[in-house]
Amino acid sequence: MNPEEVSVTAPDGRVLRYWRYLNEAGTAWVRHGAFREAFPDGQVATEGQYQHGLEAGTWRDFYPSGQVAAEGTYANGKEEGWWRFWDDAGSEEASVLFRGGAEEPPSSNGARRRPR
């Protein structure tokens, strides 16, 4: 494995930067390492990590203002644990529990917020 850094500009002007390596068969690129997507003005839109092609660890999405929009953890490419979501003013909208990429059903009263 000999990772290389890649920078790609999408048609809408967003810039994606990530690391990748060629699989053992030499037939496909696999993302591995830091990932960052930026809005056209350079402000971070998404940041996280890949491990051998799968999302891993903490990921964050941002509004163009720089305010965090979402934050949560991936394990083996699937959402895991509590994910938090905010509106563009910074007020928390929801906390949602995921297990193996599936959203846990809300409690009997419909609440999805994390217990404090």
Image: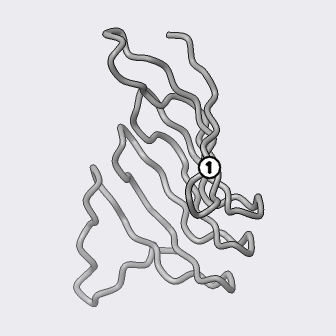
Comparing 73 with 26, the one in front is 26
Q: Is residue 51 above or below residue 62?
A: above
- Left or right placement of residue 37 versus residue 105 in this view: right
Residue 111 point in image, percent of width and height: 35, 85
Q: Which residue is mark 1?
A: 9
Q: Is residue 94 above or below residue 110?
A: above
Residue 23 point in image, percent of width and height: 38, 16
Residue 86 point in image, percent of width and height: 57, 78
Comparing 86 with 40, the one in front is 40
Measuring 69% from the left and 72% from the top, which residue is drawn there? 64
Q: Is residue 30 above or below residue 69?
A: above
Q: Residue furthest bottom?
A: 109
Residue 107 quadrant: bottom left
Q: Residue furthest front?
A: 11
Comparing 22 with 57, the one in front is 22
Q: Is residue 21 above or below residue 116?
A: above
Residue 98 quadrant: bottom left
Residue 56 point in image, percent of width and height: 46, 40
Total labels: the figure holds: 1
SS of the residue at dot 1? strand
Measuring 44% from the left and 17% from the top, which residue is drawn there? 22
Q: What is the crowding at mark 1: few (fewer than 14 residues within 10 Å), some, or many (at least 20)?
A: few
Measuring 77% from the left and 64% from the top, which residue is drawn there? 41
- The kind of residue on which mark 1 rests is Thr
